């Protein structure tokens, strides 16, 4: 694990996990649309699954969620067709071509270098079966809250309310690291892998997204 990301991403999510989970309940429309496209009896990987909000809605499929934040995964509701593993998006503990589908929602923007972001794409590509599909989301630089921000690498404030703070009787402020993606940056990163084709791309809720397919 990168020490910078441990300090500025993983440790923070462990500290705010209960509060963060409460704010993450609704599935985004494009994620729902993608999941609705799954073939029955498919095996799906959720990379950076967090509290598992995007998992288990297709009862005819099997899901595996992986995340570095074990405390966040403890917020997941039990579902018969879901399993959870603590692990790293840069070193997925699965054999090549294991999954028909993979989702990676709001994860790789927390990786601190372009090399590491590309490696995460390569790992997603590696575990997908030939002809399999993936959905990737990242925060967009071109959103109103960052209109005066000159840098793409930023620290984003999280106010941990005292009722969720077991270590303090007051509110506490944390800052999470993000790399904000400019328009077409995600597409360029994906095409650098060489094994993925882009089926669809766009912007939803201030995120850039791409639907990809593992090439023959």
Image: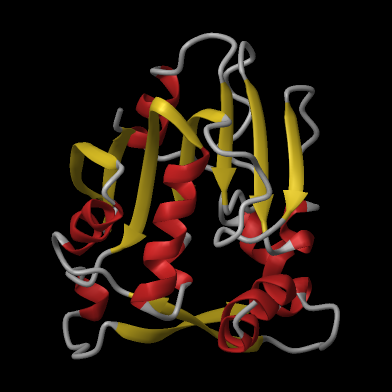
- Quarter location, residue 106: bottom left
Residue lying at 55% horizontally and 62% vertically, measured from the top left: 90
In the image, 99 versus 95, the foreground residue is 95
Q: Is residue 83 visible?
A: yes
Where 106 falls versus 81 (above or below)?
below
The one nearer the camera, 212 or 164, is 212
Q: Position of residue 64 (x, y in %)?
A: 67, 36
Q: Is residue 112 left or right of residue 93?
A: left
Residue found 70% across the figure and 58% down from its top: 87
Which residue is pictured at 47% across the width and 44% down the height?
A: 126
120 on left or right of 135: right
Question: Quarter holding the C terminus?
Answer: top left
Q: How many numbered marks, from 0 up?
A: 0
Residue 37 screen position, x and y as percent = 38, 18
Front residue of 26 and 122: 122
Above or below residue 183? Residue 144 is below
Q: Kindly tell me whether residue 76 is visible in this rendering.
A: no
131 to the left or right of 51: left
Above or below residue 20? Residue 41 is above
Q: Is residue 35 above or below residue 156?
A: above
Q: Tell whether 130 sits left or right of 59.
A: left
Residue 25 picture location, percent across and down: 57, 45
Quadrant (top left/top right/bottom left/bottom right) for the N terminus: bottom right
- Which colour scheme appears in the figure? secondary structure
Locate residue 114: give its quadrant. Answer: bottom left
**Residue 41 % position (x, y):** 59, 11
Between 44 and 165, which is closer to the camera in this rendering? Answer: 44
What residue appears at the point 44 percent right and 63 percent down from the top-left corner? 119
**Location of residue 132 by image quarter:** top left
């Amino acid at each position: 694990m990168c020490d910078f990301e441990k300090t500025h991403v993983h440790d923070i999510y462990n500290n705010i996990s209960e509060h963060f989970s409460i704010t993450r309940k609704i599935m985004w429309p494009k994620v729902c649309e993608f999941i609705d496209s799954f073939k029955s009896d498919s095996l799906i990987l959720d990379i950076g699954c967090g509290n598992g909000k995007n998992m288990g809605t297709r009862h005819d499929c099997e899901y595996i969620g992986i995340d570095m934040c074990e405390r966040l995964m403890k917020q997941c509701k039990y579902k018969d067709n879901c399993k959870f593993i603590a692990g790293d998006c840069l070193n997925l503990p699965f054999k090549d071509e294991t999954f028909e589908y993979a989702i990676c929602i709001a994860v790789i923007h927390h990786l601190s270098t372009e090399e590491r972001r590309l490696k995460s794409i390569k790992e997603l590509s590696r575990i997908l079966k030939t002809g399999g599909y993936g959905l990737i989301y990242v925060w967009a630089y071109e959103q109103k809250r960052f209109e005066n921000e000159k840098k793409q690498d930023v620290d984003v404030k999280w106010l941990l309310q005292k009722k969720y703070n077991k270590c303090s009787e007051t509110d506490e402020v944390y800052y999470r690291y993000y790399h904000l993606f400019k328009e077409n940056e995600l597409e360029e990163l994906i095409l650098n892998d060489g094994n993925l084709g882009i089926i669809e791309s766009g912007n939803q809720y201030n995120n850039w997204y791409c639907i990809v397919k593992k090439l023959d």
